Image: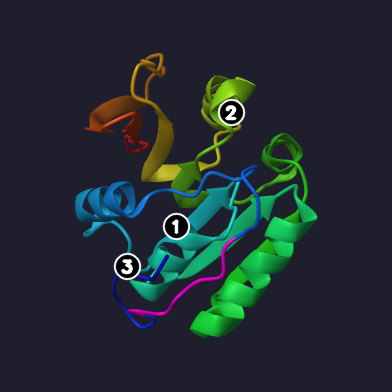
Amino acid sequence: MRVITGTARGRRLLELEGMETRPTTGKVKEGVFSALQFDIEGRRVLDLFAGTGQMGIECLSRGAASAVFVDQRKDAFEVVKKNLALTGLADRARVIHGDSRDFIARTTERFDLVFLDPPYASGLLEELLERVTVPGFDILAPYGIIVAEHPAEKTLPALPPPYRLLRTYRYGKIAVTLFRREGDE
């Protein structure tokens, strides 16, 4: 698992041991960043269920202003910190050891790009999509993007305005759905 491009291009990232964490595959990662290439520079990123931190690290490498990484697993928390140090990107990052739902409930920050990739069988994806988009509590900045990874056979529910579905990309058994928040006009 390597950083695709940017200031940390080619750096190999540490991985988590065991089968508990399912890292985003290289093909999916390349597809996601091809779709997002003009929506990263200068943005604030939230990487929930960070795992190794590869998605947020890729954003930082490509010029994102900052990234917050959240994972409840202690070993994932440690691996993200090590990967940020390996890539020289720790100065623009914050790593939080805790539950994603608790983070969403407490945060007052707004993000431009939110990655949601919970364990597929947990049912957390739909719950977090609902929490992230609650009117008046919404943590996504105007014109921000939610990137939701899920099984290809699952269709995600429509989100209420000001959100709209941009597109769903399919990569074999994996799908990635992008939602955009419209402006506050």
- Residue at 40% of width from left, 18% of height from top? 156
Q: Disc count in the image?
A: 3
Residue at the spot of label 3: 41
Residue at the spot of label 1: 55
Q: Which amino acid lies under the numbered mark 3 shown in the image of this protein? A: Glu
Q: Is residue 134 visible?
A: no
Residue 118, compared with residue 74, is above or below; it is above
Is residue 97 within the magenta segment?
Answer: no
Q: Earlier in the sequence, mark 2 or mark 3?
A: 3
- Dot 2: element: helix
- Distance between the alpha carbons at the discs numbered 1 and 2: 18 Å
Q: Which amino acid lies under the numbered mark 2 shown in the image of this protein? A: Leu
Residue 169, compared with residue 152, is above or below; it is below
- Residue at 43% of width from left, 48% of height from top? 24
- Dot 1: element: helix
Q: Outermost residue, front direction?
A: 18
* Disc number for residue 128: 2
- Foreground label between 2 and 3: 2
**Category of crowding for the residue at label 1, using alpha-carbon neighbours closer than 10 angstroms: few (below 14), some (14–19), many (at least 20):** many
Q: Which residues are magenta?
A: 9-15
Residue 161, compared with residue 27, is above or below; it is above
Q: Nearer the viewer, residue 64 or 115?
A: 115
- Residue at 74% of width from left, 59% of height from top? 75
Residue 23: percent from left, percent from top: 49, 49
CB within 8 Å, label 1 to label 3: no
Q: Quadrant of the N terminus?
A: bottom left
Give the main secondary structure of the magenta stretch: loop
